[in-house]
Amino acid sequence: MPSFLRRHRTESDDALVRRFRTGDEAAFAEIVSRYETALTRYARQMLRRRSADTAGDVVQDVLLRAYRSLSADDRPMLLRPWLYRIAHNRCLDELRVAQPAELGEELDIAPTLSTAEQAEGNERMRLLLADIESLPERQRSALVIREMGGLSYDEIAAALDVTVPAVKSLLVRARVGLAEAAQARAAAERRALAPAALPAPA
């Protein structure tokens, strides 16, 4: 592997930002390579009811805004939470103005599973995604950033412009909400399967 590629792979975010601000376009290409996929996963989860191309369009806009901002501003920043904050705000903009589109579920189920197992896995995933979507916006954002982006509490706090204790509270409430939704669904299924009470003898 060429030495300059090895250097890019091991450079910190701060080093990439510094090099880009001195005019090295390859540094921004490495930023894109490092974060585009994760940001797209986050946007897809936040925008599940939008058309298939919406998340990609949003992330391209995020990267364009980042390019312009980094070019025009030399203030220090934590790159990863800063990018997620831009993505978070753009997703909220999209949710406010765009009309929902009907989407099929795009789930990766291992091809070795039987048809019944695939159907069961699809249904579990569909219900989980629906439960996540029903969470309040900040809880959903904190959970998706944490689980899909792998950001620390400090980074999530910076991305959402809240305190670290607030992040922890949001994550706890989100997970409790998901557990309660699953429990309520299981209870409803048990009630539906329970035999009807027999009428009292005359």
Image (cartoon, grey):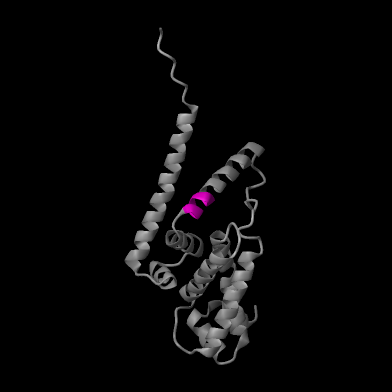
- Rendered image quadrant of residue 62: bottom right
Number of on-image labels: 0
Between 51 and 63, the residue placed more toward the observer is 51
Q: Residue 98 location in percent, x, y?
A: 59, 64
**Residue 153: in sight, yes or no?**
yes
The kind of secondary structure the magenta stretch mainly shows is helix
Q: Please give the name of the residue rendered at 60% of the width and 75% of the height, measured from the top-left corner.
A: 61
- Rendered image quadrant of residue 68: bottom right
**Residue 12: in sight, yes or no?**
no
Q: Residue 159 location in percent, x, y?
A: 44, 71
Q: Please give the name of the residue rendered at 53% of the width and 89% of the height, measured from the top-left corner.
A: 72
Q: Is residue 16 above or below residue 154?
A: below
Name the residue at the left extreme: 165
Q: Is residue 172 left or right of residue 71?
A: left
Check the picture and name the quadrant holding the N terminus. Answer: bottom right
Q: Is residue 19 magenta?
A: no
Q: Please give the name of the residue rendered at 59% of the width and 66% of the height, measured from the top-left corner.
A: 40
Q: Please give the name of the residue rendered at 58% of the width and 83% of the height, measured from the top-left corner.
A: 27
Q: Is residue 3 above or below residue 193?
A: below
Residue extent of the magenta highlight: 129-134
Q: Residue 175 location in percent, x, y?
A: 41, 52
Q: Residue 196 location in percent, x, y?
A: 46, 21
Between 121 and 84, the residue placed more toward the observer is 84
Q: Is residue 130 magenta?
A: yes
Name the residue at the top extreme: 202
Check the picture and name the quadrant holding the C terminus. Answer: top left
